Image: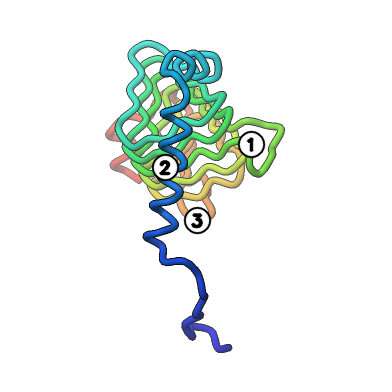
Amino acid sequence: EVAGDPVVVEEEPVEEVVEETTEEVVEEVVEQPAEEVAEETAENVVIEEEAIVLMGAVINTGCFIGKKTMIDMGAILGGNAVVKENCHIGANAVIAGTIEPYCEKSVVIEKDCLIGAGAIILEGIHVGEGSIIGANALVREDVPSYSIAVGIPAKVIKKNEKEKFLVEDLRKI
């Protein structure tokens, strides 16, 4: 076998597998009364007032979403992720969880953070208050407060001594 050669796998057509899986999930959901689903969600996920979760976002069990935080379309919050108040999690960003693979430390995103579209924050990472993570960054290490981290892997390119970055500060980078 040479790299790039097509690999032929004898399996069911994808359409059939997707159809069967979808039917199983729908049956499970339909069998569970809506009141039970709402109760379970209320016990395991906290979404504080004025937080916004847009369509297509996935919020896993045990997550906390602070006041006035926005979870954009297609973003994924893994199990037990903590996103504090006044944050924006960009479209298709992934905040890893603690469930699979198991991790003792939850991802914590402190208040006033901006996580760019498509960014990935791995298990157990702490993003300090007022930090900005660039689009498509891969965060493998903790990010200090009031920092800007970009790239794959993400590196801090600027640390601000002020409490918040101003638009003028960002234009100078």
**Depth order, front residue of 124/171:** 124
Looking at this view, name the residue that lies furthest to the top: 49
Quarter holding residue 80: top right
What residue type is disc 1 on? Ile
Which residue, given by chain and number where applicable, does mark 2 sit on?
Answer: 93
For numbered disc 2, what is the local secondary structure? loop
- Name the residue located 34 percent from the left edge and 26 percent from the top edge: 53
Which residue, given by chain and number where applicable, does mark 3 sit on?
Answer: 152
Which residue, given by chain and number where applicable, does mark 1 sit on?
Answer: 99
- Name the residue located 49 percent from the left edge and 13 percent from the top edge: 39
- Separation of disc 1 and disc 2 at Cα? 18 Å
For numbered disc 1, what is the local secondary structure? loop
Of the residues tagged 1 and 2, which is closer to the observer?
Answer: 1
For numbered disc 3, what is the local secondary structure? loop
The colour scheme applied to this rendered structure is: rainbow
**Depth order, front residue of 74/37:** 37
Position of residue 171 in the picture relative to residue 118 (left or right): left
Q: Earlier in the sequence, mark 3 or mark 2?
A: 2
Position of residue 169 in the picture relative to residue 33 (left or right): left
What residue type is disc 2 on? Ala
How crowded is the residue under tag 3: few (<14 C-alpha within 10 Å), some, or many (20+)? few
The quadrant of the image that shows the N terminus is bottom right
